């Protein structure tokens, strides 16, 4: 049987200034399959798909849809060619209803009423066909991200899309929601739709796709059948060298209690209680991982510990109580108590993007005697110190005169880590250590965290990546709606159980 | 205060609210599409000048109206160019337009009419005349409602009725048409509009153009309906008051009507009672005249509850990956 590929790209190249985002890329996606595209951040996956969706125009190359050469100058042409795209950041109007979002741009006439009636009927049919149930009259801002994603899929189907592109669809979903999404995708595939799944998660590729293409630095390095490959092999193709996927670590040897939190409560500026009585402890030489879907209070927990937010309750570090609301509740006082903080949002809280790397390595510790010469800053000393940090933490390019924004996500994170870890803190708070970080850098960052633990330091890790929590933590606490749902040992639990707890369902023994 | 006085105040309130209503709806279209427009004031002023100048020279208020709209549209075009095409700062562009209009109208006025920046006063067909609604005379004999109809609603110039009709029209366009849906969407999340295959730039220019037309009507009404000539700085902050009313109205057409009527009423009261004797205290004229402006400050300071502006308001749209 020789069916034409649903999509065939031939020799696509695209440059942004001096950066070659896509280099001579060719790919064939067969109809009725789920085709994965995997690659590190900045490998050019999204650029390629944006070209296919008419967001960018390729410098060179041709697009064939079902064997027909097709020009896609804009999104309208892509929609007409039967392509639908679900972006990583949803393109929904928050204060519109589901129905209004679905018809936006696909209205039938100048008046809305007939379009709305038709769409309502159509949605009922689609819901029955694909289990895509959504209340058509709900406002987008009032439904969860999983539902919002369904609306995006419905938008594409309403426009008669045969080819559906999903860009990092599971980043915001709980494991249960992700499973549901993949069930829907399989259903769509069974109905003859073609699906392109862009992700950096190897597990999703292995579970959901039929074929997978790997991109590295703007080039397509391989296209293989998923059944004939392995995560290790794919990781190697993505990074260009062998990568350790599991963190190599010895069992923890917990010592004295370093951090003790009792009945911590945090109320945000809007008066909503975000942390609802959390108690936990972290000992020297162990990593406590906090698992949870973003927005369940873990950020506020880190912020109180890091001195960026006020709270009530008791926090002791090395047996001595911390000031939670008063004069000594700021980040500087926390640092003096031996607490280092790698914040969740490194670009807003960890670095000043327009400042140079060497300046960034001194923030928060700028009143250190080693950095001062009388009343003035000793810039030469800071520069020298920064250069050392950059070399020890393998920041690339190893140039401390570059502005923070010109480093990749992984290297920015290394700069923050170098600053915080080299202060030799008793307690390291670390939020989303590898968000937006390449696989190669993830390996390095994980090694640094484990090395700090092995030096007998206490580490509180917050991450929305379950894999990361499972592989790094010595103990795992699950947070849901501002409360801890329970604690597990990584060897005695799995993603499924943690996923249920993250969704508010209590585990077996609690 | 007898009933007739009350009616006269209401009548005056309606007239004074009209330019505010036009300007407020103008701002509503622009801001709903994500283009903040602090230049309503300048556009009104420009329209007031060109409508008065043209009406005087040609003797036709209709040509004056067209010239006023054209003058306002030119400024709208500049604002669109700066904030949509060149993705500049919308506040700065708006402020620049206000300065431009304030200087340009006086400068051209001086050189054309040599009256210290004013235009000669308009009369006859060079002004909008009041229209008596049908049965206004007859209605006077009906108690209470009759005088209300005859005194307050009847006898205004055409533009007053146009302004009032603009309210349901705006509501219908915003909430019942495809254009309205897209317009609201582009002010909330232009990326959603872009990925749906619709031109963000096209929609925003359309919104800015509508804003220009409505500001043109506002300015023309000031010079050829409410007044009878152009006087320098005759808008007297009405553009800013309209903006405050827009926030007060939470960017909704019917609320905009109520908000501008409230401002119109305050202005009418302060015109009627230069100093108000409340028995125990006499409010000085300065205070009375400042009333609408004081209310503006109060509203802008956020004492009226939460008003959520269009989410993408003020931000130029840049495609992202």
Image: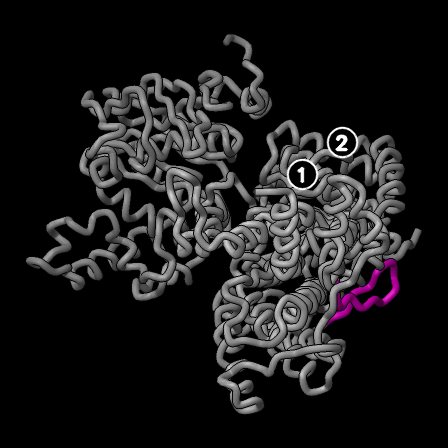
Residue A66 is inside the magenta segment: yes
Q: Secondary structure at mark 1?
A: helix
- Give coordinates of residue A115: x percent, y percent: 86, 46
Residue B148's place in the image compared with A186, above or below, is below
In depth, the one of A343 and A40 nearer the eye is A343
Which residues make up the magenta segment?
A61-74
Residue depicted at 26% across the width and 39% down the height: A331
Compared to A183, does A344 lie above or below?
Answer: below
Q: Position of residue B21 (x, y in %)?
A: 64, 56
Badge 2 sits on which subunit? A
Nearer-the-camera pick, A273 or B287:
B287
Q: Position of residue A294 (x, y in %)?
A: 51, 34
Location of residue A247 (image quadrant): top left
Residue A239 percent across, percent down from the top left: 53, 53
Whether residue A485 is visible, yes or no, is yes
Q: Which residue is mark 1?
A: A140
Location of residue B234 with respect to B268 vertically, above or below? below
In front of the other: A157 or B20:
B20
* Residue A254 falls left or right of residue A33: left
Q: Which residue in the protein does label 2 denote?
A: A135
- Label whose residue precedes the other's in the sequence (2 or 1): 2
Which chain is home to disc 1?
A: A
- Asked whether the beta carbons under mark 2 and mark 1 sit within 8 Å of each other, the answer is no
> Between marks 2 and 1, how big is the CA–CA gap?
10 Å
């Amino acid at each position: 049987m020789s069916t034409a590929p649903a999509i065939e790209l031939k020799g696509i190249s695209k440059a942004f200034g001096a950066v070659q985002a896509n280099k001579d890329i060719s790919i064939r996606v067969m109809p009725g399959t789920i085709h994965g595209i995997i690659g590190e951040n900045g490998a050019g996956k999204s650029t390629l798909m944006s070209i296919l969706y008419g967001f960018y125009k390729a410098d060179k190359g041709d697009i064939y849809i079902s064997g027909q050469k097709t020009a896609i100058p804009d999104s309208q042409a892509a929609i007409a060619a039967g392509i639908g795209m679900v972006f990583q950041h949803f393109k929904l109007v928050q204060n519109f209803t589901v129905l209004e979002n679905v018809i936006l741009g696909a209205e039938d006439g100048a008046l809305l009423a007939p379009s709305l009636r038709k769409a309502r009927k159509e949605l009922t049919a689609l819901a029955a066909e694909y289990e895509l149930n959504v209340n058509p009259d709900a406002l987008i801002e009032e439904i969860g991200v999983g539902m919002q994603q369904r609306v995006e899929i419905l938008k594409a189907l309403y426009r008669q899309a045969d080819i559906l592109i999903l860009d990092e669809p599971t980043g915001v979903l709980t494991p249960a929601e992700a499973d549901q999404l993949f069930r829907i995708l399989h259903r769509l595939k069974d109905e003859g739709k073609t699906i392109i799944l862009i992700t950096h998660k190897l597990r999703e590729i292995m579970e959901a796709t039929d074929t997978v293409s790997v991109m590295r630095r703007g080039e397509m390095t391989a296209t293989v059948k998923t059944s004939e490959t392995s995560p290790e092999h794919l990781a190697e193709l993505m990074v260009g060298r062998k990568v350790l996927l599991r963190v190599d670590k010895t069992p923890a040897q917990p010592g004295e209690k370093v951090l003790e939190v009792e009945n911590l409560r945090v109320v945000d500026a809007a008066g909503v209680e975000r942390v609802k009585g959390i108690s936990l402890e972290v000992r020297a030489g162990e990593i406590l991982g906090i698992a949870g879907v973003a927005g369940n209070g873990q950020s506020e927990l880190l912020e109180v510990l890091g001195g960026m937010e006020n709270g009530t309750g008791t926090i002791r570090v090395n047996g001595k109580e911390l000031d939670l609301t008063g004069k000594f509740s700021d980040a500087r006082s926390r640092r003096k108590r031996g607490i280092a903080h790698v914040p969740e949002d490194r670009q807003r809280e960890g670095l000043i993007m327009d400042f140079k790397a060497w300046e960034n390595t001194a923030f928060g510790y700028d009143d250190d005697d080693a950095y001062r010469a009388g009343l003035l800053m000793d810039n030469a000393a800071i520069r020298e110190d920064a250069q050392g940090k950059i070399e020890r933490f393998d920041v690339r390019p190893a140039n401390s005169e570059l502005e923070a924004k010109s480093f990749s996500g992984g290297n920015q994170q290394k700069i923050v880590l170098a600053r915080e870890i080299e202060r030799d803190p008793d307690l390291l708070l670390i939020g989303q250590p590898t968000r937006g970080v390449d696989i190669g850098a993830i390996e390095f960052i994980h090694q640094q965290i484990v090395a700090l633990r092995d030096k007998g330091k206490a580490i509180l890790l917050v991450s929305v990546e379950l894999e990361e929590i499972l592989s790094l933590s010595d103990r795992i606490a699950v947070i849901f709606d501002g409360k801890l749902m329970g604690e597990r040992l990584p060897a005695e639990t799995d993603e499924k159980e943690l996923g249920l707890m993250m969704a508010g369902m209590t585990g077996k023994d609690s | 205060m007898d009933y007739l006085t009350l009616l006269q105040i209401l009548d005056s309130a309606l007239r004074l609210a009209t330019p505010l209503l036009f300007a407020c709806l103008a701002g509503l279209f622009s801001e709903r599409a994500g283009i903040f427009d602090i230049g309503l004031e300048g556009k009104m002023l420009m329209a007031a000048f060109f409508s008065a100048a043209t009406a005087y020279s040609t003797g036709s208020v209709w040509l004056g109206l067209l010239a006023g709209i054209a003058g306002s549209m030119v400024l709208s075009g500049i604002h669109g160019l700066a904030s949509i095409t060149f993705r500049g700062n919308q506040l700065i562009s708006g402020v620049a337009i206000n300065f431009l209009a304030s200087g340009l109208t006086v400068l051209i006025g001086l050189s054309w009419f040599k009256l210290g920046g004013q235009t000669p006063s308009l009369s006859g067909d060079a002004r909008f005349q009041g229209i008596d609604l049908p049965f206004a005379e007859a209605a006077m004999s009906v108690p209470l409602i009759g005088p209300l109809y005859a005194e307050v609603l009847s006898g205004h110039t055409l533009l007053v009725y146009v302004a009032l009709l603009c309210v349901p029209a705006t509501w219908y366009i915003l909430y019942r048409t495809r254009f309205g849906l897209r317009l609201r969407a582009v002010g909330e999340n232009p990326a959603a509009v872009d990925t749906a295959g619709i031109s963000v730039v096209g929609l925003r220019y359309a919104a800015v153009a509508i804003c220009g037309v409505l500001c043109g009507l506002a300015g023309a009404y000031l010079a050829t309906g409410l007044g009878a000539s152009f006087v320098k700085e005759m808008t007297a902050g009405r553009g800013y008051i309209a903006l405050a009313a827009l926030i007060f109205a939470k960017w909704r057409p019917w609320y905009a009507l109520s908000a501008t009527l409230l401002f119109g009423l305050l202005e009418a009261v302060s015109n009627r009672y230069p100093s108000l004797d409340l028995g125990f205290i006499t409010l000085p004229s300065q205070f009375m005249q400042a009333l609408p402006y004081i209310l503006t400050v109060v509203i802008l300071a956020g004492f009226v509850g939460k008003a959520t502006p269009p989410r993408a308001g003020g931000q130029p749209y840049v495609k992202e990956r």
